[in-house]
Amino acid sequence: MTRLLLVDDHPVVRAGYQRLLELDGAYRVVAQAGTVDEALDLHREHQPELTITDLGLPGPGGMELLRHLLERDAGARVLVFSMHEGEAMVRRTFAMGARGYVSKSSAPEELLDAVACVMAGRRYLCGALPAHWLQPTPSNDLDGLQSLSDREFEVFRLLAQGLTPADCAGTLHLSPKTVSNLQTQIRDKLGLASAAAMAHLALRRGLIDAQFSS
């Protein structure tokens, strides 16, 4: 029986996932987490065969969880189950090492298909999203976002949401100087001169919700 870790900041949502997955008979949820820190601790304790995570977690967020898990164990299997359907976000998660991506707007059965596919050693992208997003990003695509490192990408998203560099430093457990340097590198790579420009690009590429750009 495949052992799973569920990560979502809504307990009711996690309970629904657990019922859906365990009714299949092939899966057992060994732990649930609502934050990145909880997920990392529980992953270390239970060593699940697959982690299913949302991206919109409080604090550092699901992409930081993905990064930390794969730094700790390059063979860790992570399936993203998220409301975000933007191309840049989907491509970035696969580039970081996610094995699958399912939109929360998908039918429940698609999550089961995704888990089965990932456990069989294949990558999975839900049918609602274009299949070619599984392929490497063209070098001239996505406004230069592919040029950002994983750390720069996450700082970019947080700044685009309106966090200050100091807020980003606290959220990501970095020094303010490091975040300031990253902010400069991001602006240079993307050719953006202001936080507003960052927010507009992030909104256009589906990396943040409209509420953050107002």
Image (cartoon, helix red, strand yellow):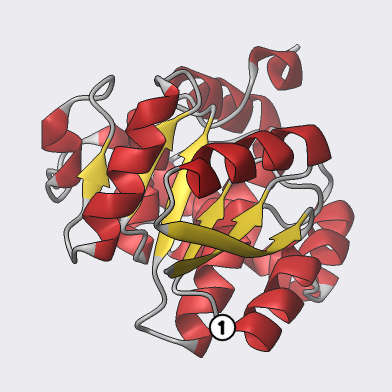
Q: Can residue 157 be seen in this view?
A: yes
Amino acid type, mark 1: Gln
* Mark 1 crowd level (few <14, some 14–19, many ≥20, 10 Å Cα): some
Question: Residue at left 37%, top 84%?
Answer: 74
Among the 4 quarters of the image, the one containing residue 120:
bottom left
Q: Where is residue 185 in the image (x, y as percent from the top left)?
A: 52, 60
- State left or right for residue 49 relative to residue 9: left
Question: Residue at left 61%, top 53%?
Answer: 62
Q: Where is residue 12 in the image (x, y as percent from the top left)?
A: 79, 33
* Viewer-proximal residue among 27 and 87: 27
Q: Is residue 162 visible?
A: no
Q: In which quarter of the image is the N terminus?
A: bottom left
Secondary structure type for disc 1 = loop
Question: Residue at left 58%, top 26%?
Answer: 197
Q: Position of residue 108 (x, y in %)?
A: 44, 26
* Viewer-proximal residue among 190 and 103: 103
Among the 4 quarters of the image, the one containing residue 173:
bottom right
187 over 128 or under it: above or below: below
Q: Position of residue 206 (x, y in %)?
A: 48, 24
Provide the residue designation for mark 1: 47
* Viewer-proximal residue among 22 and 177: 22
Instruction: Please give the count of numbered marks on the rendered protein.
Output: 1
- State left or right for residue 130 relative to residue 159: left
